[in-house]
Image (spheres, rainbow, N blue to C red):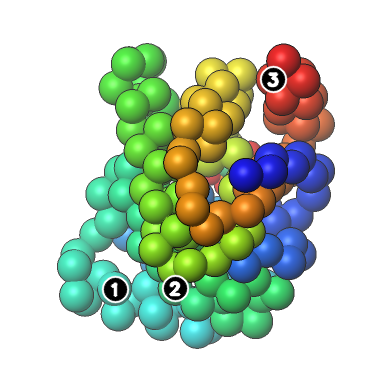
Amino acid sequence: MKIELIKGDITKIEADAIVNAANSSLLGGGGVDGAIHRAGGKQILEECRAIRNRQGKCKTGEAVVTTGGNLPAQYVIHTVGPVWNGDEEKCSKLLAKCYKNSLELAENLGIKTIAFPNISTGVYRFPKELAGKIAIEEVKNFKSEILKKVIFICFDDENEEIYRNLLEK
Ligand code: ADP
């Protein structure tokens, strides 16, 4: 599995699936979530509502899938990152679950490429360096039969620098 780093806007990425850093309501929010719903159109929200009606809120660390609506990506995998509260062990486990569950969903969909934003490092205040280490470790540990490429999309300079350094190691 190839790992790529791109600085930019995840809504523009032509991967089979992009991952959304959603909140547990699945009904949209700010940051990358807002950008994905704005660019993807109403259909994504309608599918999220249907999921909510079926299973209730999405728990932290879990992931659900919708189509990509008007996005170049075919699917959006919505995962709920932990809000950083200083409990490093618990938050780290939950963030790792976000990556693992998203990768498993992608693998079950039979897709080849997936793009991740820097989950939890915005409004949820997860320390960026630690979040980057967890993200890369989960991807490297994932044994994939079908997935060929994982792209980390960094929106801000700080995350890009962190990922560049971590991936060079
Ligand atoms: P969270 O609530 O999980 O912290 P945020 O959306 O606030 O989610 O931030 C997660 C990360 O997504 C941040 O690093 C932020 O810079 C980044 N981000 C915001 N908009 C976009 C976008 N359009 N494409 C990719 N990443 C984005």
Residue in the picture at 58% in, 81% down: 69
Q: Earlier in the sequence, mark 2 or mark 3?
A: 2
Where is residue 147 drawn, in percent x and y?
56, 55
**SS for callout 2:** strand
Element on which disc 1 rests: helix
> From this viewpoint, is residue 34 visible?
no
Ligand 1: quadrant of the figure: top right
From the viewer's perspective, is the residue at label 1 or at label 3 nearer? 3
Circles 2 and 1: CB atoms closer than 8 Å: yes
Which amino acid, by three-letter code, is at mark 3?
A: Leu
Q: In the picture provided, is 77 more to the left or to the right than 6?
A: left
Disc 2 to disc 3, how far (Cα)? 31 Å
Residue 78 horizontal/vertical position (percent): 44, 59
Expressed as whole percent of the image width and height from the top left, the position of residue 164 reads: 78, 26
In the picture provided, is 84 more to the left or to the right than 115? left
Q: Is residue 132 above or below residue 146?
A: above
Q: Earlier in the sequence, mark 2 or mark 1?
A: 1
In terms of secondary structure, where does tag 3 sit?
A: helix
Give whichever of discs 1 and 3 has the lower sequence position. Answer: 1
Which amino acid type is shown beneath numbered disc 1?
Ile
Q: Which residue is mark 1?
A: 51
Task: State the residue position of label 3.
Answer: 166
Q: Nearer the viewer, residue 114 or 42?
A: 114
Q: From the viewer's perspective, is the residue at label 2 or at label 3 nearer?
A: 3
Q: Choose between 105 and 93: the one closer to the eye.
A: 105
Residue 163 can be seen, yes or no: yes
Quadrant containing the C terminus is: top right
Residue furthest to the front: 145
Question: Mark 2 is on which residue type?
Answer: Thr
- Packing grade of label 3 (10 A; few <14, some 14-19, many >=20) is few
